[in-house]
Image (cartoon, rainbow, N blue to C red):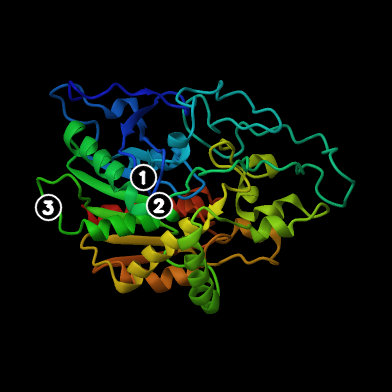
Amino acid sequence: MDAAAPTPTPDILGEPWVARRIPVTDAAAAPGADHAVLVHQRQAVPAPGAAPRHPRAVLYLHGRNDYFFQTHLAQAFLDAGYEFYALDLRACGRSAQVGLTAPQADPATPAPAGQSGPGQSTSGQSGPGQNAPDRSTPDQSGPTTPRDPAIPREPAGPPTAPGPSPHDVLDLRVHYEEINEALRIIRTEHRHSVVVLNAHSTGGLQAAIWAGDHKDEVPPSTSRVDAVVLNSPWLDFNASAFMRSYGSAAVELLAKVDPGHRLSNPAESAAGADADPRLADPYNRALHARWGGEWNWDLRLKPSPGFPVTAGFIAGIRRLQRDVHHGLGIRVPVLVTCSTASWHPGDPIQDALRADAVLSVERIMARAPFLGQDVTVIQIEGGVHDLALSPEPARSEYLRTVTTWLAERLP
């Protein structure tokens, strides 16, 4: 490691994971955000003069209302010969929180009801069903209704204090500073010769726009990647043609006068007092152990319902989606992965575990060809929005698809 480089600190995931703070300059698109956090295993830092553990590396970008916790995804890349790095972008995840730079609790201890631990074993590997709260006692809150008594009724969403919320970024291009610095660390300090950019959902749009804007970078520049792997990228709105056109135009007009105006969550509003509480956030609540799912991420960093969405954020996303439609001209190989089906309000709640309950897979597939010159699209049967969190066998199929594609395209 460079003698001037800061020493990484223990990460909330526990050993062997460490976190490195990346300072960033203040920007109007993310006011008050002053750092990002790069997460990797301690062994990723090579000894002075030594070669890295793996010559190749992956840099992972999370989605909105998200942070890196999917250590099984990291393990799949490690097993394929790629060192794994994850970047919690400014104003997001670890970078938006205070006092979460060290393990919160013994990761082997089940989380009490209403709380959540990192969701992994003592080996540092995340996995389904670990740290799940005790759901054997029926929930006693509120009036008795004919619902699953194992599913808690009380909300676990974020506080609604005024001012910017985590992930409330007006232009995703503001993240270029920390992405480029992370790539410099990976290529220069840790000496990886090949780097793949892997990203999910909003991070997928972020990665695509970044790759298009940096398509002309060549060595010795470190702001370049050798391939891009996108997991359910947010390339277009999940809405009718009318709403994609006139609805988004109305939001953009609103954003010009009140960018901080918070937009309502129709799903949350539709989940009345007597409704299944999973309807307030079908995707996350189908997955999280608190509501009977397999995974137990930290609900402070990835709450349900999610952090508020503002008009300014949506307007910024729409501008970038139009850039995608105009063509990005990415020159490195691109893999776009998504589910084979979309879940819609009114569909059985259990179907949210077999489809994308956030985005339209049809819109993803329609926009994928606009990304670049060499785009492969592969759908995963039974996959959810974050394909890495899909129930088996879709989860393993996604991981196998990605590593096989990389082996073929970057032999």
Label 2 or label 3, whichever comes before in sequence order: 2
Numbered disc in front, either 2 or 1:
2
Q: CA distance from mark 2 to mark 1?
A: 9 Å
Q: Are marks 1 and 3 in contact (CB under 8 Å)?
A: no
The kind of residue on which mark 2 rests is Gly
The residue tagged 2 is: 203
Q: CA distance from mark 2 to mark 3?
A: 23 Å
Q: Residue 93: x and y, percent?
A: 47, 39
Q: Residue 7: x and y, percent?
A: 29, 21
- Secondary structure under tag 2 reads helix
- 393 vs 38, left or right, is right
Label 1 or label 3, whichever comes before in sequence order: 1
Q: Is disc 3 surrounded by few (<14), some (14 to 19) or many (20+) residues within 10 Å?
A: few
The residue tagged 3 is: 218
- 271 vs 406, left or right, is right
- Residue at 47% x, 66% y: name it: 252
Q: Is disc 1 surrounded by few (<14), some (14 to 19) or many (20+) residues within 10 Å?
A: many
Label 2 or label 1, whichever comes before in sequence order: 1
The kind of residue on which mark 3 rests is Val
- Residue at 57% x, 50% y: name it: 308
- Secondary structure under tag 3 reads loop
Vertical relation: 9 (above or below) 126: above
- Residue at 10% x, 48% y: name it: 219
- Residue at 54% x, 56% y: name it: 384
In the rendered image, the residue lying farthest to the right is 144
Q: Is disc 2 surrounded by few (<14), some (14 to 19) or many (20+) residues within 10 Å?
A: many
Could you tell me which quadrant the N terminus lies in? top left
Q: Residue 258: x and y, percent?
A: 51, 57
Q: Residue 121: x and y, percent?
A: 53, 28
Question: Is residue 159 or residue 36 the one in the foreground?
Answer: 159
Q: Are marks 2 and 1 in contact (CB under 8 Å)?
A: yes
The residue tagged 1 is: 60
